[in-house]
Image: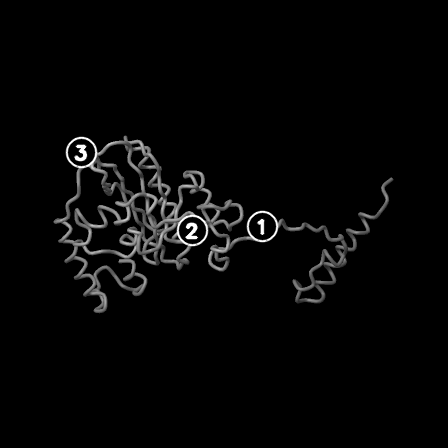
Amino acid sequence: MRRLWIHNPKLEWDDPIPKEDHQKWANFFQDLSEMEKIKVNRCTKPKEATGNPVLVIFSDGSNDAYGGCTYASYRWRLLNGDHETNLILSKNRLAPSKKLSVDRIELCGAVLNKRLKTTITEQCRYRFEKCYHITDSQIVHSMVQKESYGFNTFAAVRVGEIQEGTNTKDWYWTASEFSVADLLTRGSKPNDIGMNSKWQKGPDFLKLPESEWPITKTYLEQQIRINTIKLEVSSPAIQTNPTDTLASRINIEKYSNYKKLLRVKARILAMYKKELKPTL
């Protein structure tokens, strides 16, 4: 729908869909009918699970998805030593029609990551042994580790919310190939999100011991690209107090009429004489 309005601003509700988009609409409605066949587990906790679960939240972003997308799953320790993960909650939004850099959208996705964690911990009756916030953006991962005062307003507000609602030590980076949130930002077929799919069970590495997960919390300052999300100079600005003179009070460039400039100059001179006049 958004693509139609952007590329065809004069398109009315009763107008036929352009030919180049007609097949995409047909495929969409065909896939929509397949959604009825998708099944999900009613309970996220396996019967043989023991101990407290681990909460894992993924986030991602693209030019199509608003602010990135989040994936949450439990990881239970079973009696036989295996691990099982189940989908709990997910949320995604469309990116705004106004063009934003991918890094900014990834940052918005990290905000959703934080909000999902807040919702789950408040509404779910389980206690979590540990929480993993995983993003595939090195820029976002680096920004979360920094103080929010060093960024421009857009980034500072979002980084501040993330830091206020999460522990920065719980944030990790992984390669895009291991991030299941990629399904939310770029779309997927109904056949790919069934009960035993990667979408509902999480990526395969969650079945491994946590020490073998392909994630890292290494933070490097140079990972932040200043030309993508502005990082202001950390050194404080030097405030100067210029000498208050007649020249400093008159900006000649603002006047295109010479006579008007003379009148303004005369009034300022009169003010100077009044200020310099000794008081009795």
The image's colour scheme reads one colour
Most foreground residue, 172 or 143: 172
Quarter-of-image position of residue 119: top left
Q: Residue 172, which numbered label?
A: none
The answer to which of marks 2 and 3 sits earlier in the sequence is 3
Q: What kind of residue is marked 1?
A: Ser
* Pointer 1 local density, CA inside 10 Å: few below 14, some 14–19, many at least 20: few
The residue under the point 83% across, 48% down is 276
Q: Secondary structure at mark 2?
A: helix
Q: Position of residue 139 (x, y in %)?
A: 44, 53
State left or right for residue 17 relative to residue 244. Answer: left
Q: CA distance from mark 3 to mark 1?
A: 53 Å
State left or right for residue 249 relative to residue 180. Answer: right
Q: Secondary structure at mark 1?
A: loop
- Residue of label 3: 47
Q: CA distance from mark 2 to mark 1?
A: 19 Å
268 in relation to 208, above or below: below
Q: Residue 234, which numbered label?
A: 1
264 in relation to 154, above or below: below
- Residue of label 2: 140
The answer to which of marks 3 and 1 sits earlier in the sequence is 3
Q: Position of residue 35 (x, y in %)?
A: 15, 51
Q: Position of residue 27 (x, y in %)?
A: 17, 61
Q: What kind of residue is marked 3?
A: Lys
The answer to which of marks 2 and 1 sits earlier in the sequence is 2
Q: What kind of residue is marked 2?
A: Val
